[in-house]
Image (cartoon, rainbow, N blue to C red):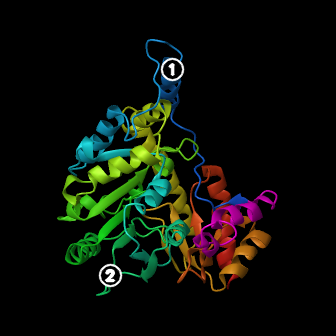
Amino acid sequence: MISSNYYKLSEQYLFSRIGRIISERHGAINLSIGDVSLPLPREVSEAGARAAMELGDKSTFRGYPPECGYDFLRKAVARYYNDRGVTVDQSEVFISDGIKSDMAMFFHVFNRGKVLLPTPCYPAYIDVCAIFGFEVSFYEDAPSEEKADIIVICSPDNPTGRAKSKAELEAWVRYAKRTGAIILYDAAYEAFVQSGAPRSIYEIEGARECAVELCSFSKTAGFTGLRCGYTVVPSECGLGKVWARLKSSLSNGVSYVTQRMAECALTSALDKIRGNVKQYLDNAALFRSALSGADFVGGEDSPYIWLRVGDGKAEFYRFLDEYNLGVTPGYGFGRNGDGYVRINSFCSKENAIVAAQRLRDWVRGRG
């Protein structure tokens, strides 16, 4: 018997549906699906090659990886935080294949209750709540008096591209501690923050008692095709043993080869990883300049620009038909998304220059 919760989902996941439509338009520059375009740094590829060769030698062969990750990568992640002045112990780091699966796995931990989601909202959050039968309420900015069991925060936000300020995050931590809620903090785009806004929830006093932070190598290190991420579960929040036990039942971990590549991305290749992030931000700066006079946010601390367009569905097709640009219609991000489109900057520099001119043409075409 198929769970009735499945029938609460749309027939296709948003990005699968939009990707199919855009792929049918010959020569369209795709600024929709948030997939990277820059290749892995050579050091990262070579680390993977060396690790693969180890698996072909009897003396260095490895079987199943530890469910919570190899110590060498957990240590590298902890150092990545500590070098920014954020205290994280390697025992609090759990390696995964990415944020989406770990976010879903966390919903196994909690009794069915109420979840606060941002609006507009990354659609996977809505889907996972529906699949596991959680009640959903939406928030726009600051917490209200409404009580919830789980709060999902994404900063910099997807789709709006806006990073939350320290004061905003302090308000959410106070709310969570007052109500006994747990914060699931999606930090997928932390490496893009340039404004001085917090890159980790743990920059906020008291957050270690009420927040779990999920992060990924996908957008920062170009691992969308490799799949590797990590979740930080602080000792103070009391979920570490539960999480480790759940991981051992529901996951066989991430491959040794991938984890060695991720370790390299955080160590010897870190400067090149930062260079790739800068190129995507440079693309976003081109787009922001091209959209001068239009109503938008994002693009400073994020690869995403959230552009007000009026009729979101009509403008999605207008971008395709008249300007050969693929964007994501805002209505796919739920309430408060209609009337906008999301533009991402994960394209090549050459495509970014062409796309920026087309965005200028779109602005002029609106009078």
What residue do we see at 47% from left, 60% from top?
104
Q: Residues within 10 Å of mark 2 (few under 14, many from 20)?
A: few
Q: Is residue 139 left or right of residue 328?
A: left
Which labelled disc corresponds to residue 311?
none
State whether residue 80 is above or below residue 168.
above
Membership of 228 in magenta stretch: no
Is any part of residue 158 visible from this angle? yes
Quarter occupied by the N terminus: bottom right
State whether residue 191 is above or below residue 211.
above
N-terminal of the pair, mark 1 or mark 2, is: 1
Query: Quick one: SS at disc 2?
Result: loop
Membership of 11 in magenta stretch: yes
State whether residue 99 is above or below residue 53.
below
Residue type for callout 2? Ala
The spot of residue 158 in percent (x, y) is 49, 67
Q: Quadrant of residue 75?
A: top left
Q: Which residue is mark 2?
A: 142
Query: Given this view, does label 1 or label 2 mark the residue nearer the observer?
Result: 1
What residue do we see at 23% from left, 59% from top?
237
Q: Which residue is mark 1?
A: 55
Residue type for callout 1? Leu
**Magenta region:** 1-28
Is any part of residue 199 visible from this angle? no
The spot of residue 288 in percent (x, y) is 53, 68
Q: Is residue 24 left or right of residue 347?
A: right
The spot of residue 73 in percent (x, y) is 36, 36
In the image, 286 versus 112, the foreground residue is 112
Task: Measure the alpha-carbon separation of dots 1 and 2.
Answer: 50 Å
Query: Quick one: SS at disc 1?
Result: loop
